[in-house]
Image: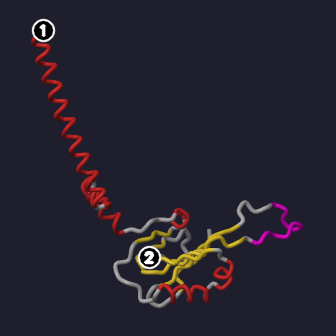
Amino acid sequence: MKRRQRIRSRTWKISGFVGALLLVIGLGWFIALLRHPQGGLRLLVPHLAETSQASAVQLPALYTAGVILGTPSQPASLSQEQALLLASQWQPEEASKARKVVARYVLLTYIPRQTNQAQIENVPAWMIIYEQIPLQPAEASVDPTPFPRSSYDFYLFLDAKNGKVLLTLWT
């Protein structure tokens, strides 16, 4: 009977120690996450933290089209205002009809799905997003099928050095 109690007592002590140790590790990692959002990830998976800092947020519609966004390490030659002005000159119809316009400075990589298009690798670019552009419905006598959506988004990528159009996509 005493032997069982000793074994049970030892088991309780070991499990208590392991539980306390795990609690301290978890609490330490949580504090690291609060102090440095990327730093806590670096403690858990070091190589993942390095890649997550170098890449920007991926947009699913662009990713499926072969566009990968990153974060440029150098400042843009063109300002955001210059990029927006150039974009409105390159695509005046989209610029005038869009309900919202967003500009982001990104590192552009484009892997085309078709072989007749050029691949773009790690080029600093301004991504101009024209959001919620209304679709013009076809004439009912020609095509009575209604559109499944009432608007689309248009993406224009301008070279951040010279303002030339690198890529255009609509979703």
Which span of residues is magenta-colored? 136-145
What label sits on residue 106 in the rendered view? 2
Q: Is residue 22 left or right of residue 143?
A: left
Q: Secondary structure at mark 1?
A: loop
Q: Position of residue 59 (x, y in %)?
A: 51, 65
Query: Can you say which quadrant of the picture contains the C terminus?
Result: bottom right
Q: Secondary structure at mark 2?
A: strand
User: Of residues 129 and 138, which is closer to you in this image?
Assistant: 129
Q: Quadrant of residue 121?
A: bottom left
| Prevailing secondary structure class for the magenta stretch in the rendered image | loop
Residue type, label 2: Val
Q: Quadrant of residue 78?
A: bottom left
Q: How many marks?
A: 2
Residue corresponding to mark 1: 1
Q: Position of residue 85 (x, y in %)?
A: 56, 89
> Which residue is found at the position 51% from the left and 78% from the top?
103
Q: Which residue in the rendered view is the most extreme toward the right?
A: 141
Dot placed on the residue nearer the N-terminal end, 2 or 1? 1
Q: Is residue 137 magenta?
A: yes
Query: Can you say which quadrant of the picture contains the N terminus?
Result: top left
Residue type, label 1: Met
Q: Is residue 56 above or below residue 31?
A: below
